[in-house]
Image (cartoon, rainbow, N blue to C red):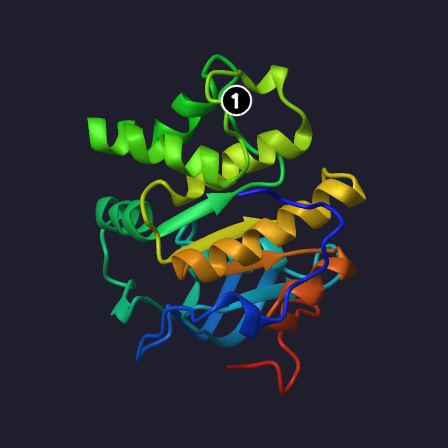
Amino acid sequence: MKIDPHESALPLADLGPVASYARPVARLSGVGKTYGQVHALADINLDVQAGEMLAIVGPSGSGKTTLLNLIGLLDKPTTGEIEVLGEPTARLSPVEYARRRQSSIGFVFQSYNLIPVLDALDNVLLPLRLAGRTSHAQNARARELLDEVGLNGHHHKHPEQMSGGQRQRVAIARALITNPQLVIADEPTASLDSGNARAAMQLFQRLNHTHGVTFVFSTHDERALSYMTRSIRLCDGRLPDGDEH
């Protein structure tokens, strides 16, 4: 697949159907998060619908990353309930919480979080190796994902040999290697120039429709909103009326 950095967001109808499920991929009910005396989030009610590309926007300090961490099961709420794929998470043990996260959710971080001593292929395979799930078939799938994100011929390059846009694509392939139903992306275009940012969002949109993956983003990039199916705006750790569910 060739990514054209000058191509604009495609109409959803041109990309074909996405997966549809009876229940939201994630549901937050009355969720709050407190760090000491700081109330980072309060009374968040939100459904993340299957197959959507949802943007969480708001100024710095509004709680975007905290909300992403809760949706992605990287942290637990102080109050309220979170369901992922229809299953409550409140009573899960730390081991069960991690297992649910590893099996159902992928992550794309702003700083990519690639391992410098590993090449692109091994970085993509890392989540499977950490879970003890590598096989010949999964190695082949990692190669296919790298090709799909436009890195054919770059499988054995290390992060320092790649551009920012290429490192971002490795991170995207790694997020998809476990076949997640949900991918969390925290400011995925913040470290990219305008051309690479456009190409990255174009790639996210295509993967959303070809793989049926639900994406939840935090972003300061207003240009990225044209690729979203929905956006919500956080203000002082709350969702204004009308942005909930």
User: Viewed as shown, does residue 135 lie left or right of 202?
Assistant: left
User: Viewed as shown, does residue 98 lie left or right of 163?
Assistant: left
User: Viewed as shown, does residue 20 lie left or right of 214?
Assistant: left
Q: Residue at x 29, y 28 (%)?
A: 139
Q: Secondary structure at mark 1?
A: loop
**How dense is the environment of label 1, judged by Cα within 10 Å: few (below 14), some, or many (20 and up)?**
some
Does residue 245 lie above or below 222 as drawn? below
Q: Where in the figure is residue 170, as x and y percent of width and height?
A: 51, 33
- Image quadrant in which you'd find residue 243: bottom right
Does residue 44 lie above or below 10 as drawn? below
Camera-side residue of 168 and 17:
17
Does residue 239 lie above or below 171 as drawn? below
- Image quadrant in which you'd find residue 205: bottom right
Q: Residue at x 29, y 64 (%)?
A: 90
Q: Where in the figure is residue 58, as x and y percent of width and height?
A: 72, 64
- Image quadrant in which you'd find residue 230: bottom right
Q: Where in the figure is residue 122, as x and y percent of width and height?
A: 39, 22
Residue placed furthest toward the bottom: 242
* Residue where numbered disc 1 is placed: 154
Q: Is residue 178 among what the camera can see?
A: yes
Residue placed furthest toward the top: 117
Q: Residue at x 57, y 34 (%)?
A: 112
Camera-side residue of 225 and 84:
225
Camera-side residue of 4 and 110:
4
Q: Residue type at mark 1?
A: His
Q: Where in the figure is residue 133, as x and y percent of width and height?
A: 20, 32
Q: Residue at x 46, y 22 (%)?
A: 155
